[in-house]
Amino acid sequence: MNIYLDDNFVSEMTNSAVSKGQSIFQIYKFGNDKEHVEKLLTLFNPPSGKLLDVGCGIGKVSELISEKRKDIQCVLLNISQSQLDLCPDMEKIHADFHSIPTEDNEFDSVMFNYSLGHGRLIDGLKEAARVLKTNGVLFIYDIASDNPLSIYESLGYATYSERDVIETAKLFGLKCTLRSRADGSNTDDF
């Protein structure tokens, strides 16, 4: 069940979170919003050019990336129109990430931040590979689990093992560098 198919529900949940001061909807964050994005940029190190933020929430991560890296043009993609309406003034695409309405090889980088589990792994990575330029960078910061019956699944969020993500990415010619547990902790984020 993808909760994002009910945009009224998403709107209520998003507005509730925003009213409580939340702007980045990720389970684990590296400090405050700016510190978190600085750490993501350290892990990601996106190339200059166009970056597609898949499942962008209200666009705060891309907004902070744009402030820090003037050489990057962020494009926000979200299936939720209510979340896109709250995003900063950037290029926005209202679409499902299983079928991204852009040209092949359009982006220098693609990032999924706690969004990959809202969809099907194989279709999401196939589209990411299609829209990435040759030698483009795919960045995934998400929950990893070898247990398909995790608590997240009961909430409608699919978790994928690191191995499954890597093997699926390889199907589409994506090269993988695993930076799991990047902060030295025992988290399942990668």
Image: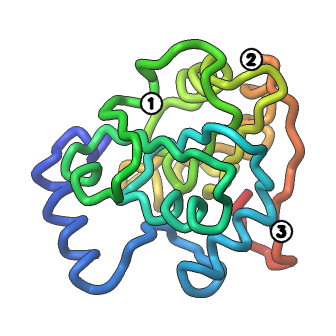
- 3D distance between C-alphas at marks 3 and 2: 25 Å
Where, by quadrant of the figure, is residue 97 drawn? top left
Q: Residue at the location (64% across, 57% down)?
A: 70
Direction from residue 144 to residue 9 in the image, left or right:
left
> What residue does disc 1 label?
97
| Above or below, comparing residue 123 to residue 76 in the picture | above
Q: Earlier in the sequence, mark 2 or mark 1?
A: 1
Q: Say whether residue 170 is left or right of residue 155.
A: right
Secondary element under disc 2, as helix, strand or loop, is: loop
Nearer to the camera, 150 or 84: 84
- Residue at the image point whose x is 54% and y is 22% from the top: 123
At label 2, the amino acid type is Phe
Q: Residue at x 21, y 81 (%)?
A: 19
Q: Quadrant of the N terminus?
A: top left
Image coordinates for residue 120, horizontal then vertical, percent: 50, 30
Residue 51 visible in image: yes
Q: CA distance from mark 2 to mark 1?
A: 16 Å
Using residue 69 as the reference point, say whether residue 58 is left or right of it. Answer: left
How far apart marks 3 and 1 lie (CA) works out to 26 Å
